[in-house]
Amino acid sequence: ATPTALLVGTGRGAQLGILIRGPEVLESTRAVDTVVLDKTGTITTGRMMLADLTADRTDETTLLRLAGAVEAASEHPIARAVAEAARREGASGPGEVPTVASFQSDGGLGVHGVVDGTLVIVGRPSYVAEWAMPLSARLEDARRSAELAGATAVAVGWDGAARGILVVSDTVRPTAAEAVRRLRALGLRPVLLTGDNEAAARSAATAVGIDDVVAGVLPQGKVDEITRLQRAGRVVAMVGDGVNDAPALVAADLGIAMGTGTDAAIEAADLTLVRDDVLAVADAIRLSRRTLRIIR
Ligand code: ADP
Ligand code: MG
């Protein structure tokens, strides 16, 4: 490939809303045969909503107030949904969510911090259980029915007990199914990869026509899955948006970030989809194939 021809490709990329880190990136897209897609924020809009909540050994107002205070310090899509609901529905009136101290985030697991002198844990049920706050039978039921419905159940605990399940849900991007069809038309194999639960992952995968699903993974697990595919001889593109996707974007042969993704994802990626449209993944791969065909 001559540098001039590749630069023509990058110019066309800009027109399509694809930001390319450097001309050499187009060379690596050519050999890609597998496209791994993150779920939340990539296949789905990433604009989550609080759909339901169950309180146990506390009341709903306290549950939302404490969880909302911790989540207000996090940028995770789940956190935004919870903090927003707490601001809207707080009994103390809008905008009166207490501030959190000693906030900490455990990527892909959950968050914790001190609110009104109490250490509050919010995250995966298994993460909250690790703080010696396992779900009661009532909360376990709430978790199970949320997940059966394809939603995400987030546990909340303090003072030595799990005290609530918050149910958050997301919507599949309107263009995601078409994006997957176009990837298949190019001979690419789509894989859905997510830290979310198996049922939520399956429901999103079914909606967009993906059969291969890897769910419940930790951020390091995302890297491991990319490496596993590469060892099996695949050339892998990874599409993601979150802080937790950044290591996997680096590990992939081609890293693609959503335009509204976190800075960490955009910095880690080779390509950024400026218009935040997952349809552009197929455009990017088609563009590089065409550019390289012209110059051969
Ligand atoms: P995805 O791979 O779908 O983008 P993540 O790896 O970011 O998901 O998160 C995986 C899981 O970790 C979430 O489904 C949730 O259970 C938990 N989690 C992560 N961050 C938070 C948070 N700020 N608040 C509540 N739960 C969280
Ligand atoms: Mg994501």
Image (cartoon, rainbow, N blue to C red):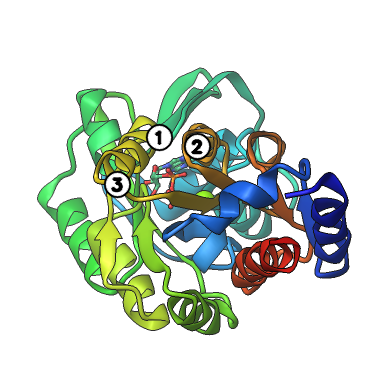
Sequence-wise, the earlier of marks 2 and 1 is: 1
Q: Name the residue under label 1.
A: 219
Q: Residue 40: x percent and y percent? A: 49, 58
Frontmost residue, 249 versus 161 = 249
Compared across the picture, whether 287 is left or right of 40 comes to right
The type of residue carrying mark 3 is: Gly
Compared across the picture, whether 282 is left or right of 2 comes to left
Q: Residue 30: x percent and y percent? A: 56, 57
User: Can the viewer see residue 87?
Assistant: yes
Q: Mark 3 points at which residue?
A: 233
Q: Which residue is drawn at 78% across and 66% down?
A: 275
Q: Distance between the residues labelled 3 and 1?
A: 22 Å
Sequence-wise, the earlier of marks 3 and 1 is: 1
Q: Residue at x 36, y 30 (%)?
A: 220
Q: Which residue is drawn at 40% across and 35% down?
A: 219
Q: In which quarter of the image is residue 255?
A: top right
- The residue carrying pointer 3 sits among few (fewer than 14), some (14 to 19) or many (20 or more) residues within 10 Å by Cα, namely few
The type of residue carrying mark 2 is: Asn
Q: How far apart are marks 3 and 2 (CA)?
A: 25 Å
Q: Quadrant of residue 46?
A: bottom right
Quarter of the rendering occupied by the C terminus? bottom right
Q: What element carries label 1?
A: helix
User: Can the viewer see residue 241?
Assistant: no
Contact, mark 2 vs mark 1 (Cβ under 8 Å): yes
- The residue carrying pointer 2 sits among few (fewer than 14), some (14 to 19) or many (20 or more) residues within 10 Å by Cα, namely many
- Asked if disc 1 is less than 8 Å from ligand 1, the answer is yes
- Asked if disc 2 is less than 8 Å from ligand 1, the answer is yes
Q: Which of marks 3 and 2 is in front?
A: 3
Residue extending farthest front: 296
